Image (spheres, rainbow, N blue to C red):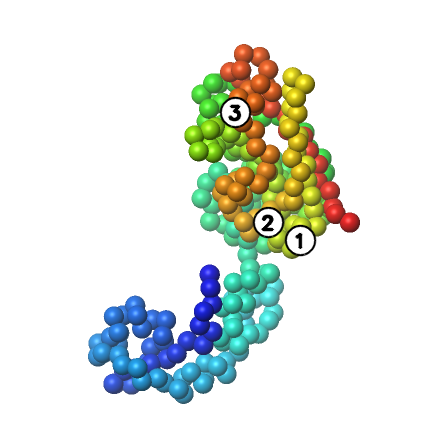
Amino acid sequence: MKFLHQNPLYYLCLNGHTLCSGCKPKVDNRCPTCRHELGNIRCLALEKLAASLELPCKYQSFGCNGIYPYYSKPKHEYQCSYRPYGCPYAGSECTVIGDIPHLVAHLKDDHKVDMHNGCTFNHRYVKSNPHEVENATWMLTVFSCFGQYFCLHFEAFHIGLAPVYIAFLRFMGDNNEAKNYSYSLEVGGNGRKLIWQGVPRSIRDSHRKVRDSFDGLIIQRNMALFFSGGDRKELKLRVTGRIWKEQ
């Protein structure tokens, strides 16, 4: 989203009706009230009035108490630190928004997500049916540590035509806070091991955006089945890791 015009213009039709420059192209240059053609006569009084207005942020109910000039209010709201977060649950197009405590309760109560305390994890991902191995769905686990919440994602997807699995961590908060933490992920078997270390991405970045940027531990399908042992038809992966706070 770009803010190219901080001060939109206001126009008058011949009958004195007003319209802003943002709406003018949308009505084919005709007044939506009387249908007369709009010229380029500006309503300077209305522009001056708009410039004098100061309004509260639309996220006031989420804790933002700032008052902003009319023309700079949209830019502030676009990056307001109090703006609500979207639900980080990736298995459906969930439209729930809210602050972090609300989303944590929502994940637990409505999505039945596994919640864990602690900064280390040791998870097994098992798919015994060959069809499920080919179409393993995503999984989400939430960890509470350092007084914060982190979302661990694991799923199957494709890079081009190559089937892969990916595991990555997202931080339930803003990017400037996420940068205070690091995490590592490890998976292995049969004497081999893959290790990933990175910085958790904020849930401001969508699950799909993080996944499609390959910002996590990526395991090729054949390697995942090799780690699983057996006849290579069953997925048995153990993903371990930890979260720590940077000094």
Question: With respect to residue 232, does 55 lie above or below?
Answer: below
- Tell which residue pokes out farthest to the top in this image: 231
Q: Nearer the viewer, mark 1 or mark 3?
A: 3
Residue visible at 27% across and 81% down? 39
Count neighbours of disc 3 (C-alpha within 10 A) and say few if under 14, some if 14 to 19, many if 20 or more.
Answer: some
Which amino acid, mark 1?
Answer: Glu
Question: With respect to residue 174, does 108 lie above or below?
Answer: above
Is 160 positioned to the left or the right of 101 in the image?
left
- Residue topped by disc 2: 202
The picture places residue 190, in percent across and down from the top left corner, at 65, 17
Label 2's element? strand
Label 3's element? helix
Which amino acid, mark 2?
Answer: Ser
Count neighbours of disc 1 (C-alpha within 10 A) and say few if under 14, some if 14 to 19, many if 20 or more.
Answer: some
Which amino acid, mark 3?
Answer: Arg
Residue visible at 49% across and 22% down? 133
Q: Are marks 1 and 2 in contact (CB under 8 Å)?
A: yes
Indicate which disc residue 64 carries: none
Is 193 positioned to the left or the right of 103 in the image?
right
- Residue topped by disc 3: 221
Question: With respect to residue 239, does 142 lie above or below?
Answer: below
Label 1's element? helix
The picture places residue 221, in percent across and down from the top left corner, at 52, 24
Whether residue 201 is visible? yes
In terms of sequence position, does the residue under pointer 1 or pointer 3 come before the other? 1
